[in-house]
Amino acid sequence: MQEIASETPALGRDRFGPGGRLLLITSKYLAIAGGLVFVGLVVMSIVSIVGRKLFSWPVPGDVEVLQMCTAFAAASFFAFCHLANGDVKVDFFTHNLAPRNIARLDAFGSLLVGLFGALLAWRTAAGALSLKEVGETSAILGWPVWIAQALMVPGFALLGAAGFYLCFHLLRAAARYRQS
């Protein structure tokens, strides 16, 4: 069995330009924020469950808070995962290809990720604006639903930017392979 490569040979994070490093740092801090939100949600869930079972006092609207905050937190991880080469890749057919061709295929995959991230950011923002116009609120707490949806937009936009950046980065790497 072949050992799984942790990163594409042409894609050392140290080879990112200033724009790539800025994307990486921004996405890392957004992922940390998402992780902290998840930790807070775990604490809130434990308090609510223990309060409900022992004292008949749950956290009011805990499910609403969990749903709204989880959406933001999950969207916060995608860009960092992509920049850190943490995506799921099936290289059964490609592991014997030349590094230049692997870089090209990875560039195409990153282009698709960029397009998908941009599409998600656009449609999520449009949905948030629609929810703001109709004034939809959560059932128990009465929180505006559009805010939770709008908080997902930066994560998706950053995913789009990361995908496009890696696409061009990998195409440059493929060109370097051709020259060597």
Image: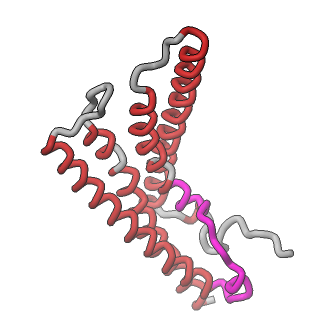
Q: Quadrant of the N terminus?
A: bottom right
Q: Camera-side residue: 87 or 50?
A: 50
Q: Camera-side residue: 45 or 119?
A: 45
Seen in the picture, residue 141 relative to 90 is either above or below; the reply is above
Q: Camera-side residue: 137 or 3?
A: 137
Question: Which SS does the magenta portion mostly show?
Answer: loop
Q: Residue at x 32, y 26 (%)?
A: 140
Q: Residue at x 56, y 30 (%)?
A: 42
Which residues make up the magenta segment?
79-99
Where does the image place residue 29, in percent across and percent down from the top left? 48, 42
Where does the image place residue 50, in percent across and percent down from the top left? 60, 17
Seen in the picture, residue 54 relative to 100 is either above or below; the reply is above
Q: Is residue 173 magenta?
A: no
Seen in the picture, residue 79 relative to 67 is either above or below; the reply is below
Looking at the image, residue 168 sits to the left or right of residue 118; the answer is right
Looking at the image, residue 175 sits to the left or right of residue 114; the answer is right
Where does the image place residue 142, in percent across and percent down from the top left? 26, 28
Question: Which residue extends farthest top?
Answer: 55
Where does the image place residue 138, in percent across and percent down from the top left? 29, 33
Seen in the picture, residue 98 relative to 56 is either above or below; the reply is below
